[in-house]
Amino acid sequence: MPHKSVFLQAVRYKARAKRFSPRTERVYVAWIRRFIRFHGLRHPGALGEAEVAAFLNHLAVERRVAPATQAQALCALLFLYGEVLGRPLGRLDALRWARKRARLPVVLTGEEVEAVLRELKGVPWMVCMLLYGSGLRLSEALQLRVKDVDLARGEIRVRDTKGGRPRVTVLSEVVREPLRVHLGEVRRLHEADLRAGTGDVELPGALATKYPAAGREWAWQWVFPAGRRYVAVGGEVRRHHVHESVIQRAVKAAVRRSGIGKRASCHTFRHSFATHLLEGRYDIRTVQELLGHRDVRTTMIYTHVLNRGGLGVQSPADLLGGGGKAER
């Protein structure tokens, strides 16, 4: 087969031609690389449905991945054969699907959210306030541009979404003034970059071609820029947004220090946002719009983790007049 970097570069070009998000491109390339290595670096063109099924079965049976992970790998291989190699896959009769395990999201109480937030400061605190206060995913918060935050109206416009559906969500009053101060610091950093002859950021799609100077405009700057600049493929010196791992590590350490006893992560704040809105009697359709869910059934999972117990009912034991007391 051709040198793997050349072949995978062709995969990247096709993904960009299909206007996939950078994240989807990286994930698909990673799965295709794993598929090639699993079959001893043989060219995918020499492999077929049997080899694809063997790889997916390996993930389900030996690696014991979640159904969504196996489905993601399948989508990457369908793209490889259908779009890159021009040979769509046929029936995968030997495919064994990973066993689906029903899981409820981890949700924090209001007190637990406060306990974790008290252990955060600076940018990690501000990002987590957007996750909990606005229901953003971590990637959505870090990919915010200055023009997406409307401090006067108390709104956030989310454009780079998981499902590709832009939405508007609420900006909490608590974070407005800290965010205003933060943006002032970011503007000073951007002006310093401009004086140094840089100050450019990556633009979505073909905007950089259509508007070559837009990458240096204030409106397009990241709300949470990284501390270091990097050299892009074309030689431009740019500044990316803060990496996800920076926030993830900070949250993990904060959860440990808070002593709440739950396996909470960045995404737990989004789960808690939805659950607490439903506890506050907000309409489920409103919550669906704020979260950006395409199907209300996705939002309905939060109705099972409300504060009246796992099934949303009151225990009959709580209706007793007292009865006996547990002996100690």
Image: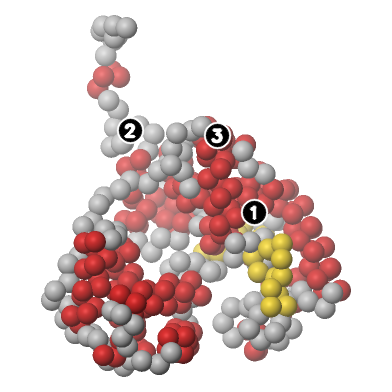
Residue 117 in which image quadrant: top right
Q: Position of residue 223 (x, y in %)?
A: 68, 62
- Specify few, some or many for label 3: CA neighbours under 10 Å numbering under 14, 14-19, or 20 or more: some
* Rendered image: mark on residue 309: 2
Q: Position of residue 114 (x, y in %)?
A: 57, 36
- What secondary structure is marked by label 1? loop
Q: Which residue is mark 3?
A: 258
- Specify few, some or many for label 1: CA neighbours under 10 Å numbering under 14, 14-19, or 20 or more: some
- What secondary structure is marked by label 3? helix
The answer to whether residue 130 shows anywhere in this view is no
* Rendered image: mark on residue 154: 1
**Which callout, 3 or 1, points to the residue nearer the camera?**
3
Viewer-nearest residue: 252 or 18:
252
Tell me what residue is drawn at x 64 percent, y 54 percent. Answer: 154
Q: Amino acid at mark 1?
A: Gly
Distance of label 3 from label 2 (alpha carbons): 23 Å
Q: Position of residue 174 (x, y in %)?
A: 66, 43
Tell me what residue is drawn at x 21 percent, y 61 percent. Answer: 61
Residue 189, placed above or below residue 267: below
**Which callout, 2 or 1, points to the residue nearer the camera?**
2
Residue 91, placed above or below residue 246: below
